Image: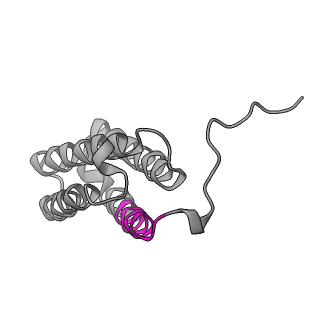
């Protein structure tokens, strides 16, 4: 039995614009830092926020991969992910968990939101 064909093939590294590669690398680094911080301070957060943080980490992986693969509507998905991550940062900060983490991640994701509009193909999103 053969597996079903993939919807979109991964692009070769040379085919991915440099700005997109840099943006993706920065977002992966932010996602890793966020995931480590949430795991480290998990006792401070209610279970619902822990699950939301796990969802944002998985969503980040999917969304950043879409940008790298050049998937259709990847820029729209990335904007939605960033807004979702900002909402989570706000919720984490207001829950009394770790205000500094929330402020830092909120600021970095806000900068990411601004820089994501500069990516190639973002104007068509």
As drawn, the residue found furthest toward the right would be: 1
Question: Where residue 16 appears, x then y in whole percent?
Answer: 51, 63
Question: Where residue 45 appears, x then y in whole percent?
Answer: 25, 47
Residue under the point 25% across and 55% down: 117
Q: Is residue 31 magenta?
A: yes
Task: Read off the magenta span.
Answer: 17-33
Tell me if 97 is positioned left or right of 48 in this view: left
Residue 119, above or below 8? below
Q: Main secondary structure of the magenta part?
A: helix
Question: Where residue 43 appears, x then y in whole percent?
Answer: 29, 52
Name the foreground residue: 85 vs 22.
22
Name the foreground residue: 27 vs 35.
27
Question: Where residue 112 appears, x then y in whole percent?
Answer: 25, 60
Residue under the point 60% across and 56% down: 11
Quarter of the picture containing the N terminus is: top right
Tell me if 39 is positioned left or right of 112 in this view: right
């Amino acid at each position: 039995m053969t597996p079903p064909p993939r919807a979109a093939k991964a692009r070769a590294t040379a085919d991915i614009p440099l700005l997109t590669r840099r943006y993706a690398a920065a977002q992966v680094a932010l996602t890793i830092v966020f995931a480590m911080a949430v795991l480290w301070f998990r006792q401070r957060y209610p279970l619902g926020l822990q699950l939301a943080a796990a969802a944002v980490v998985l969503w980040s992986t999917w969304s950043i991969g879409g940008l790298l693969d050049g998937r259709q509507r990847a820029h729209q998905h990335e904007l939605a992910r960033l807004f979702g991550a900002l909402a989570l940062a706000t919720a984490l900060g207001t829950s009394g968990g770790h205000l500094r983490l929330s402020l830092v991640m909120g600021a970095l994701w806000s900068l990411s939101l601004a820089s994501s509009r500069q990516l190639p193909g973002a104007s068509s999103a």
